[in-house]
Image: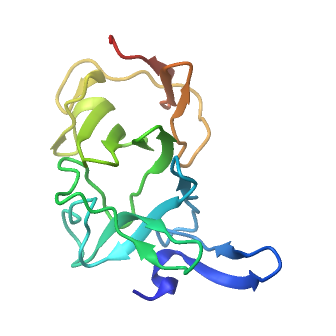
Amino acid sequence: MDLAQTGFRIAQRQEQAGRLELDRRPDERRGQELPPVADGKGQPILWWASGFGTLIPKCGFGTNFTTDLSRFDLATGRRVLIDNGRPASGQTTETDNLYAMAIGGRYLYLRQNFRGTSMIDLGTSQHWRISAVYRRHDGGGWHSPINYAQGDGGKVRAPSTPACTAGRVAPIIANGRLYFTETFAVTCAETDQ
């Protein structure tokens, strides 16, 4: 795959430092940059345009292509597939609606305001939904352990507050807890185990 399709390009090689300098360019065709995350081995994971995703299932509509998550080989500048033999079933994307990312051990956390927070085990492709504002919204079902309101047709709506920071904000993992923002709250979640 051509490196230019990744949302990154090699700007220059610094031979003395022995590393590649990457020049980020806007992603999602809307001018918003979505930075990569580094896994536990220091390898960057980033969004790639692809016709054949291995970790993320194909986009639901609007294109023959999809957005997939893969590692970036710093030595060669090539894509390294995260292929566990199956995609992370249940994880949805659209080419103009990607997620901010965070790493916690072997888990990749994905976050966007509309679809909420989810988690993928990078070693098995197992997928879990963590949160979504509404249980039903915009014709879709977002059944998660954390939902704040029923949504479409429901009488209870999520509270509205003054405008907050726009854009995609990755979850934060600290002291065994997961923190993420909604437009109306900061949520702290922890496991019962």
The percent position of residue 137, horizontal first and vertical second, equals 23, 39
Q: Nearer the viewer, residue 93 or 176?
A: 176
- The quarter in which the N terminus is drawn is bottom left
Residue 17 quadrant:
bottom right
Asked if one can make out residue 10 in the rendered structure from this viewpoint, the answer is: yes
Left/right of residue 105 with respect to residue 121 in the rendered view:
right
Asked if one can make out residue 115 in the rendered structure from this viewpoint, the answer is: no
The percent position of residue 85, horizontal first and vertical second, equals 17, 60
Q: For the point 61% across and 74% down, which residue is it?
A: 25
Left/right of residue 80 with respect to residue 14 in the rendered view:
left
Q: Nearer the viewer, residue 68 or 64?
A: 68
Q: Nearer the viewer, residue 154 or 148?
A: 148
- Can you say whether 31 is above or below 108 in the image? below
Residue that sits furthest to the right in the current view: 16
Residue 138 quadrant:
top left
Q: Nearer the viewer, residue 13 or 110?
A: 13
Q: How many marks?
A: 0
Residue 77 quadrant:
bottom right
The percent position of residue 152, horizontal first and vertical second, equals 19, 33
The percent position of residue 127, horizontal first and vertical second, equals 25, 42
Residue that sits furthest to the top in the current view: 192
- Can you say whether 190 is above or below 55 in the image? above
Q: What's the coloring here? A: rainbow
Q: For the point 55% across and 81% down, which residue is it?
A: 76
Q: For the point 43% across and 51% down, which residue is it?
A: 99
- The quarter in which the C terminus is drawn is top left
Q: For the point 83% across and 79% down, which residue is it?
A: 16
